[in-house]
Amino acid sequence: MKHFITGFPPIGTLTEETKDLCYDEYREANCHIHTPYSFSAFKGMDEIFRMAVRENITVLGINDFYVTDGYDAFHKGCVENGIFPLFNIEFIGLLKDEQKRGIRINDPNNPGRIYFCGKGLDYPFHTDFFSGMRLKNVIRENQNQIRAMIAKINSLIFKQGLDMKLSYEAIKKEYAEGLVMERHIVKAVRLLIEKYFTVKEEQINFIEKLWGEKKSEFASGLPADFENEIRSKLLKNGRPAFIEENEKSFLKLEKIINIIVRAGGIPCYPVLLDDYHGKYTEFESEPVKLLKSLQKLNIGCIELIPGRNDLSILKNFVEFFHANGFIIILGTEHNTPEMAPLSISAKGKTPLDGTLKKIAWEGACVIAAHQYLRINGMQGCATHNSRIIAKQRQELARLGQRVIEYFINANKRQNET
């Protein structure tokens, strides 16, 4: 599918055509959502766009694990609904030295494991042969682990003397658009239990036997809560159906960054920040130390999911990194069963203030400018040079705002005709 930006005018013409527009200080942007092509709270792609239109989201970023299979449907849906699309991707890597030293990065439960994103990738997606092979190998190993988990759950069910089981193929067909993820397994387990046991007490009794301990905390009756409990007590480290990942399931960080850069994207570190108990991982506990670590890796872009952060902590952190030249973007993820708004807020649904919204909008505009420049055969953002990124940020943000406003106004004109 052809990128919609290919129809945009060159920079000089674009600047001229947008010079008289009235620019808002910021618009609503959400630069990180997962779709059904990995795992998502959304039942389908159409639900994403309906919500985005209803909440007046101007910019939206797809951010699935390992795959870009959803890009075509996302591109089509965004353009049809007047939403500017950002094309992103997410990986899980491993820092072995940190793992040996017990240092947690941005996974609160697994030392050494790192979540890492690429922002503003070229669309249509492309990569070189070796990067493509690495991606295929990681996906294959990941799906092997998923199959092993399913087999282990089936053996636990068999021990209960019940004639019921899960299958990888059925889960993929019924619940997944592409990859089968851990969350898909959990959903399948919940639905299997509900199919065979119609009374809530029977469901709880069965699942307690399955994970071998009492007592279930499933009190709310909400499917999302049930799934979260199944996941934590059945599939996580030390639990009955846990399968340790093969190291081949993880790429080294430098290889992840190489894949992102070769695909035209900007390497971006997703910050966990404070958890629900106000605690931090060792890697993120000191902002100055984190800043130096990211600069050493030549990473000049970070993102946060504010829904899990205290507003005052979030604000201080964002302002510190923004003052140090970082591109900063915000999102909601939507990679759990819970359905939340696409509009971004801090922990406890606390609204973001104007400063945070302006910084987040600037970041979204930088990514939009990068995509525009790339599609026009230019370098765009200095994807892997934090010092140059700091110098480029304001100029790219101004261009990106023009690109987005051009898109919005062109879409309005088309709808009027």
Image (cartoon, grey):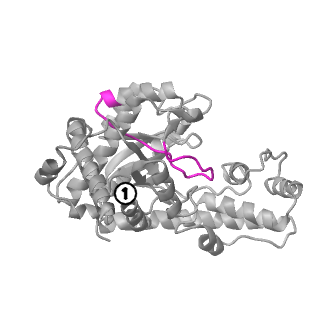
x and y, in percent, of residue 82 in the image: 37, 57
Q: Is residue 232 left or right of residue 361?
A: right
Could you tell me which residue is drawn at 56 percent across and 34 percent down? 347
Would you say residue 9 is visible in this rendering?
yes
Residue 407, quarter of the rendered image: bottom left
Please state which amino acid type lies under the numbered disc 1: Gly
Q: Nearer the viewer, residue 102 or 223?
A: 223
Q: Position of residue 413 (x, y in %)?
A: 28, 59
Q: Quadrant of the N terminus?
A: bottom left
Badge count: 1
User: In the rendered view, would you say 232 is above or below 346?
Assistant: below
Instruction: Report crowding for label 1: few under 14, some 14 to 19, many 20 or more residues within 10 A (C-alpha).
Output: many
Circle 1 — which element? loop
Placement of the C terminus among the 4 image quadrants: bottom left
Give the image location of residue 317, x and y in percent.
Answer: 42, 28
Residue at x 51% of width, y 28% of height: 311
Residue at 79% x, 67% y is: 195
Q: Nearer the viewer, residue 256 or 267?
A: 267
Residue 118 on the magenta segment: no
- Residue 320 drawn above or below residue 20: above
Determine the main secondary structure of the stretch shown in magenta. Answer: loop
Q: Is residue 333 magenta?
A: yes
Please provide the residue range marked out in magenta.
322-343
Give the residue at mark 1. Answer: 82
| Residue 281 visible in the shown view | no
Farthest-out residue, left? 12
